[in-house]
């Protein structure tokens, strides 16, 4: 990408803003080297990494980069045999630790949120904990070699401290002596040239002997090393030289360790710098309230409420523009100071940012293209030194652009054809636009020439645009209006400023009829646009309200379905529990009756009555429906035994056998008898009236039917052994219920189940006889047993 274009579009200012978000010098260096890419896949990779970093910042508050330093110079010096100082070694250890901590942090994030691009970079960070531990074992947090770095260093420093203490104690003993104090300028011990000395007055210089190491500026004080401590100071100096030698030995050993892992360290630095650079881009996106653009490589741009990133957000006017679909060239006309140049730069700068892997300050859903190059001729670049006029400067740039552009380029031209005769300038502008348009480039050009309005109006793929101007306030609104050519507004502005109406009318008369029609057409277009814009905003508001209602209704429906499912599950569980309880009770009652029969060979009536009561109590009680939920009763008081009725909930016709209670009746449906609620019965045909039988006055005992007993047993799919157990229980219940005959459904199949059941019936004590069912009763698939 041409550096001049980057400068023209203020690209470097964006990089400076981004660099402020880098946590390390390594990241800042990467930001400063960032250039847009024309490779579609490379740009997608960059944006994916930025998007992941944005999400990490949103979810975790940012990645840790503390302690990481630029150690490349130190590592290269260690590799060629140089010795690193303690501060450099300390930076190496901290950078190793910082890289490992950053890697662990991003791995933890990846467990909750996929960040493949960032995770790939962390895989390039080597752990190197052994090297870090060895360095920190020898270098403390103040970048000093510790005593424990080696046994020899510990011994030397211990002896050194002892020798220094002896020398200091000897001198302090001297300065405390009254006879010597009068010879001293100050009663203290100090150091000169790494040796302990005392400040002696000039006139007593020969009293102490020894060596003079320094004197005061006035010469009145001499710093003398008394002869009594010369040997002690010599020993201190000797030990310090040994200490330096041992420290150098330790530093060289640590430098060798660094040199051995130089490649891994440089790889760590590259990976960490790339991560810091990526998170700097995420920080810039947060600062600008930017979004992830949708990329394409087909030359399509659709910016939704895009903002120039260098204009404060509270004062910038958003830009809406589409280019590359129905039209590939936009010609923006209108007066100066209307914002044409800012709109031009916004399109170019947002494209450069997207191609650099940066989020763009626009609404979500904005689409940008990866161009192979962006060319711009913006601003007055007149050069006095080159003796170039404004027109010449523009032409020089445009000629270079024509030589270098391709069909996949974006061309931005400001004030096309300006700086020369209007007639020639407009003709040249039209010719240039025609040439670039035929090339297939995407073009946005600004101009003052009205001739270009008609050119854009007649050409396919080219559209007019203008910057909106408020005639009432005599100020631009800085809004780009695509599809509407610009008006001069000169007459309206002059009239508002107070110019005489006669002068304005005369001026209007000087304007050609064709120009007046064009102005009138533009005014009509603008009026229609404003009306359409208002209607669009109203429709958009209604759409948002409908969408909000739809979301609420879907949420309510989901809650209703979840509640319904929970109620169904609860009802099923309760029903299963009730049926299981009733079955257990029935089994216990039948077992008791069988036991009593075995013991007494007959069942007494009071035993039957007691069993009947217990069976009644075992029937599950179902919740009654709420008032109003039941269908209205259909004349239940008029129903009698023998009436033909319709069972409404089953949609089956039958005959009433008997009225069991005030709310139930026994109904014969084909071969089945069942209890039905009177409310579910609808009279079809009343029974013929018959004389009632006189009531029996004599007292008698008889077996009563079990209201829960069934007249048929379905054994299809069961094996013979289980079926015989069920048949035995069924016959006991039917016998107690005083049924005359019952139906055992065993199916046709192979006949094994039928044969076994009939053999069992032949020997059963309650069975009087049995037969195969008639055609209308199920044929050979049913056995009808007549009970005693």
Image: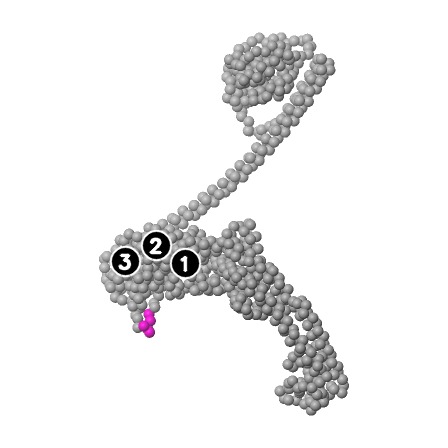
For label 1, the SS is loop
Residue 383 painted magenta: yes
Which numbered disc flags the more N-terminal residue, 3 or 2? 3
**Horizontal and vertical percent for residue 562?**
55, 37
Question: Position of 401 compared to 698: left or right?
Answer: left
Q: Main secondary structure of the magenta part?
A: loop
Q: Residues within 10 Å of mark 1 (few under 14, many from 20)?
A: many
Question: In this figure, which residue is indicated by the disc labeled 1?
Answer: 37
**Horizontal and vertical percent for residue 36?**
41, 60
- Checking the image for residue 435, the label placed there is 3
Mark whose residue sits in front, 1 or 2: 1
State the residue at coordinates (32%, 65%). Answer: 397
Which numbered disc flags the more N-terminal residue, 1 or 3? 1
State the residue at coordinates (62%, 62%). Answer: 133
Residue 672 versus residue 278 in the image, above or below: above
Pick the front one: 57 or 304: 57
Quadrant where the C terminus sits is: top right
Mark whose residue sits in front, 1 or 3: 1
The CA distance from mark 1 to mark 2 is 29 Å
Question: Position of 461 compared to 732: left or right?
Answer: left
Question: In this figure, which residue is indicated by the disc labeled 2?
Answer: 482
């Amino acid at each position: 990408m041409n550096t001049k274009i980057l400068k023209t579009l203020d690209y470097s200012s964006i990089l400076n803003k981004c660099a402020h978000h880098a946590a390390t010098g390594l990241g800042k260096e990467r930001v400063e080297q960032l250039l847009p890419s024309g490779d579609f896949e490379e740009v997608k990779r960059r944006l994916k990494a930025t998007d992941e970093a944005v999400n990490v910042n949103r979810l975790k508050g940012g990645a840790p980069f503390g302690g990481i330093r630029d150690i490349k110079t130190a590592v290269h010096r260690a590799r060629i045999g140089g010795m690193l100082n303690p501060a450099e070694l300390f930076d190496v250890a901290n950078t190793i630790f910082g890289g490992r901590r950053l890697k662990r942090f991003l791995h933890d994030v990846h467990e909750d949120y996929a960040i493949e691009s960032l995770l790939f970079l962390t895989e390039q960070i080597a752990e190197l904990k052994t090297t870090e531990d060895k360095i920190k074992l020898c270098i403390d947090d103040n970048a000093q070699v510790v005593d424990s770095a080696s046994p020899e260093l510990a011994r030397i420093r211990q002896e050194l401290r002892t020798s220094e203490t002896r020398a200091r104690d000897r001198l302090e003993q001297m300065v405390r002596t009254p006879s010597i104090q009068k010879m001293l300028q100050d009663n203290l011990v100090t150091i000169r040239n790494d040796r302990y000395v005392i400040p002696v007055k000039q006139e007593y210089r020969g009293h102490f002997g020894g060596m003079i190491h320094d004197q005061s500026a006035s010469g009145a004080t001499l710093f003398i090393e008394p002869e009594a401590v010369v040997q002690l100071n010599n020993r201190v100096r000797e030990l310090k030289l040994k200490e330096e030698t041992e420290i150098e030995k330790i530093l060289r050993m640590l430098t060798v360790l660094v040199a051995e892992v130089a490649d891994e360290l440089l790889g760590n630095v590259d990976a960490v710098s790339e991560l810091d650079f990526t998170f700097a881009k995420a920080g810039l996106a947060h600062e600008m309230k930017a979004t992830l653009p949708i990329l394409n490589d087909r030359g399509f741009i659709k910016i939704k409420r895009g903002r120039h990133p260098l204009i404060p957000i509270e004062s910038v006017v958003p830009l809406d523009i589409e280019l590359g679909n129905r039209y590939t060239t936009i010609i923006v006309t209108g007066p100066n100071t209307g914002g044409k140049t800012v709109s031009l730069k916004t399109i170019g700068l947002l494209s450069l940012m997207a191609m650099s892997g940066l989020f763009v300050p626009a609404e979500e859903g904005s689409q940008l293209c990866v161009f192979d190059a962006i060319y711009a001729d913006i601003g007055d670049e007149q050069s006095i030194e080159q003796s170039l006029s404004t027109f010449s400067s523009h032409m020089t740039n445009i000629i270079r652009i024509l030589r270098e552009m391709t069909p996949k380029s974006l061309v931005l031209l400001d004030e096309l054809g300006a700086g020369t005769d209007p007639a020639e300038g407009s003709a040249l502008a039209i010719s240039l636009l025609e040439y670039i348009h035929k090339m297939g480039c995407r073009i946005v050009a600004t101009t003052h020439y009205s001739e270009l309005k008609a050119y854009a109006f007649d050409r396919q793929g080219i559209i007019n645009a203008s910057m909106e101007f408020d005639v009432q306030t005599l100020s631009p609104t800085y809004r780009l209006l695509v599809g509407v050519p610009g008006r001069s507004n000169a007459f309206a502005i002059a009239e508002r400023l107070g110019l005489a109406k006669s002068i304005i009318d005369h001026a209007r008369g000087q304007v050609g009829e064709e120009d007046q029609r064009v102005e009138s057409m533009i005014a009509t277009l603008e009026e229609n646009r404003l009306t359409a814009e208002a209607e669009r905003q109203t429709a958009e508001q209604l759409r948002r309200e409908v969408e909000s209602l739809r979301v609420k209704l879907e949420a309510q429906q989901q809650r209703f379905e979840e509640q319904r499912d929970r109620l169904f599950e609860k009802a099923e569980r309760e029903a299963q529990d009730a049926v299981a309880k009733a079955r257990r009770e029935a089994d216990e009652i039948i077992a008791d009756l069988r036991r009593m029969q075995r013991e007494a060979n007959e069942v007494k009536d009071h035993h039957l009555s007691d069993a009947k009561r217990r069976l009644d109590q075992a029937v599950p009680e179902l919740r009654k429906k709420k008032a109003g939920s039941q269908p209205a009763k259909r004349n239940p008081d008029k129903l009698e035994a023998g009436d033909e009725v319709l069972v409404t909930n089953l949609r089956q016709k039958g005959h009433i056998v008997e009225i069991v209670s005030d709310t139930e009746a026994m109904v014969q449906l084909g071969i089945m008898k069942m209890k039905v609620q009177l409310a579910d019965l609808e009279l079809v045909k009343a029974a013929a009236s018959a004389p009632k039988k006189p009531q029996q006055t004599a007292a008698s005992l008889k077996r009563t039917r079990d209201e829960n007993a069934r007249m048929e047993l379905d054994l299809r799919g069961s094996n013979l052994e289980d079926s015989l157990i069920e048949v035995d229980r069924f016959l006991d219940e039917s016998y107690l219920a005083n049924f005359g005959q019952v139906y055992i459904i065993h199916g046709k199949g192979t006949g094994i189940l039928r044969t076994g059941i009939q053999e069992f019936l032949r020997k059963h004590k309650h069975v009087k006889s049995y037969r195969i069912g008639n055609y209308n009763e199920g044929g050979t698939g049913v056995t009808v047993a007549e009970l005693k």
